[in-house]
Image (cartoon, rainbow, N blue to C red):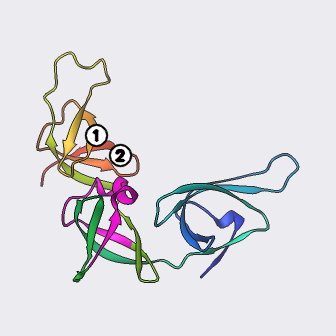
Amino acid sequence: MAVLSYNEILPKCIITYNNEPYEVLSSHIFRMQMRKPVNQTKLRHLVSGKVIEISFHQNETMNEAEVDTMQAVYLYTNKGESWFAEVGNLKNRFSFPEEVVHDKVQWLISNSVVEVLTHEEKPMTIKISVKVDLEVKDSPPAVKGNTVSGGSKLAELVSGAKIQVPLFINTGDIVRINTDTGLYTERVEKA
């Protein structure tokens, strides 16, 4: 377990704060007038998903959390829970409350393989690719003269997520989505 000084607490690091695992979402080191430097951070609790803002001062250190990973298959979401099974050991099933992992699960279809972060053998949260390719399930036809709104329309993906796409996207097209922002990036040619 590594000890991080205040200026090493950077985005994507996973630290132990108040004996709980947190992922660093953002950090900004600055100095206010004659004071010592401060690292202002946003941390997301890996289990509950709650985001907090914490400032670390020059004399503070944090322990890097001991986090392991395992491969898991996304099964389904039902009654407020998203279910997964460990790859190679499908009897090892576990779930997360839907509100905690919804921002990631909305980009998954059944049998998608994800990375699960674990702490002391206990699953904490899931990690997915920054970009995913999904098929458009429903896309209304473009209406002539409808470019005043920027030339986009609402489309539903096979995963159930709804996003804004350009007017030329049709039902059955494969689109690439940035999972961090939830935005369309490009149309992908079918293989």
Sequence-first disc among 2 and 1:
1
- The local crowd at label 1, few if under 14, some if 14 to 19, many if 20 or more residues have their Cα within 10 Å, is some
**Residue that extends furthest to the right in the rendered view of this protein:** 34
**Residue in view at x 63 percent, y 70 percent:** 18
Work out whether 95 lies above or below 156: below
Query: Which of the 4 image quarters holds residue 168?
Result: top left
Instruction: Name the residue carrying label 2.
Output: 182
**Residue in view at x 30 percent, y 17 percent:** 148
Work out whether 118 lies above or below 170: below
Query: Which of the 4 image quarters holds residue 139?
Result: top left
Q: In the rendered image, which quarter contains the C terminus? A: bottom left
Instruction: Name the residue carrying label 1.
Output: 163
Q: Is residue 114 magenta?
A: yes
Q: Mark 2: which amino acid?
A: Gly
Residue contact at pointers 2 and 1, CB within 8 angstroms: yes
- Residues drawn in magenta: 93-116
Coordinates of residue 179 in the picture (x, y in percent): 35, 52
Q: Specify whether 47 is left or right of 95.
A: right
Q: Is residue 26 visible?
A: no
Q: Specify whether 73 is left or right of 52.
A: left
Q: In the rendered image, which quarter contains the N terminus? A: bottom right
